[in-house]
Image (tube, rainbow, N blue to C red):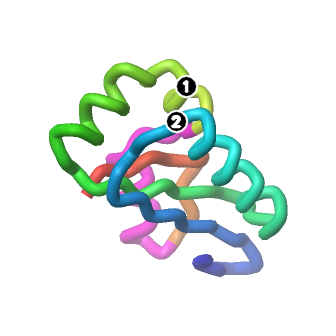
Amino acid sequence: MLVRDARVVAVEAETRLRDVQALLRRVAAKRRDGAADRLVLVVADTRTNREVVRVARPEFVAAFPADARTAWSALAAGLPPPGDSLILV
């Protein structure tokens, strides 16, 4: 969790994407239970993970509407991203 000016950003890290629906349910519960204002899903940038994200793009866009570049910029400035975001690193 990152906290800035009473705004909470939950951060979840995944090394390997498998079951997208289970992952989305789990991170939604984490956000809800942690009372987070934003959620950033950090995923290892591997060929397999990129393919999973490509195939499940509609689900990921719906769950994480803020693009990675915007989220990175906000976080670098010490601000929460404008929306939930998926970042490949």
Quarter assignment of residue 49: top left
Quarter assignment of residue 77: bottom left
Please give left or right for residue 33 compared with residue 66 in the image. Answer: right
The residues colored magenta run 64-78
Image coordinates of residue 47 in percent, x first then y, are: 16, 39
In front of the other: 77 or 31? 31
- Judged from this view, the residue extending furthest toward the left is 47
Image coordinates of residue 65 in percent, x first then y, are: 55, 35
Residue at the spot 44% in from the left edge and 53% down from the top edge: 71
In front of the other: 37 or 21? 21
Please give left or right for residue 74 compared with residue 9 in the image. Answer: left
User: Can you identify the residue that label 2 sits on?
Assistant: 20
> Around disc 2, counting alpha carbons within 10 Å, would you say few (fewer than 14), some (14 to 19), or many (20 or more)?
some
Q: Is residue 16 magenta?
A: no
Identify the main secondary structure in magenta. Answer: helix
Quarter assignment of residue 67: top left
In front of the other: 4 or 59? 59
Q: Which label was assigned to residue 59? A: 1
Q: Measure the alpha-carbon separation of dots 1 and 2.
A: 8 Å
Please give left or right for residue 49 compared with residue 70 in the image. Answer: left
Amino acid at pointer 1: Glu
